[in-house]
Image (cartoon, coloured by chain):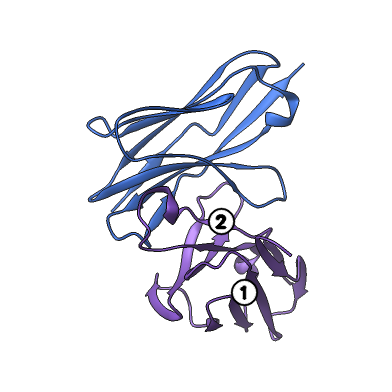
Chain colours: A blue, B purple
Amino acid sequence: GQNIDQPTEMTATEGAIVQINCTYQTSGFNGLFWYQQHAGEAPTFLSYNVLDGLEEKGRFSSFLSRSKGYSYLLLKELQMKDSASYLCAVRDIRALDMRFGAGTRLTVKP
Amino acid sequence: ETGVTQTPRHLVMGMTNKKSLKCEQHLGHNAMYWYKQSAKKPLELMFVYSLEERVENNSVPSRFSPECPNSSHLFLHLHTLQPEDSALYLCASSQVASGGAGDTQYFGPGTRLTVL
């Protein structure tokens, strides 16, 4: 099975940097995804990691360590619009099977 | 329209009603998914259709019945639901077997369901 853990809530200041951690256990790892979900809206895809290391996409970066079952999402130069829930999801070796964490609700304050 | 669309966006129904949720994807994908999202809980995968065949059912109660007439449309038929079934129901689609990030799931806006 899969256990995916991430903090429930985080708060950060506009312009700052925040790191959202995700730890997972899986019997057959085949990729890790980060999604952003604003209240009342659909999750939107942010990043994908399948090999160890850092993937950078503008203000957002995602890191993966498969040996540690660990990932983080790094958000730089925070903006008020970044206030949202951030979902960590792990894909099983059966490509159709993806499990989500409960999400981290990030609040960005002025 | 582009992306993944869902109708209705909001639905209130009694426990004895029968209703259906509709999802349509305009991305040319070959797999579609139904998820349930309850407050403060992880997204729960309910059903998966790949190439129009149902390939997974995570022990969802029979009061939920999926239908996938073609690769672009997905329905969730609801009957005799319970109040605990109130949640956000999300549809997603992906292109399976392309490998890597090509299997990324893209979500619709969801249907907010309230069962009275």
The reply to the same-chain question for discs 2 and 1 is: yes
Quarter of the N terminus of chain A within the rendering: bottom left
Question: Would you say residue B33 is visible in this rendering?
Answer: yes
**How many other residues sit within 10 Å of disc 1, few (<14), some (14-19) or many (≥20)?**
some
Mark closest to the chain's N terminus, 2 or 1 = 1
Identity of the residue drawn at 59% across and 19% down: A76
To which quarter of the image does residue B110 belong? bottom right
Find residue A23 and report its horizontal and vertical position in percent. Answer: 36, 34
Question: Distance of mark 2 from mark 1, alpha carbons?
Answer: 28 Å
Q: Which residue is mark 1?
A: B82
B96 versus A18 height, above or below? below
What residue does disc 2 label?
B106
Pinpoint the chain carrying mark 1: B
Above or below residue A14? Residue B45 is below
* Residue B114 can be seen in this image: no
Q: Position of residue A98 (x, y in %)?
A: 40, 55
Looking at the rendered structure, the secondary structure element under dot 1 is loop
Q: Nearer the viewer, residue B41 or B75?
A: B75
Q: Amino acid at mark 1?
A: Gln
Q: Mark 2 belongs to which amino acid? A: Tyr
Q: Would you say B17 lies left or right of A49 here?
A: right
Q: Chain of mark 2?
A: B
- Quarter of image, res A77: top right
Rendered view: A19 above or below B71? above
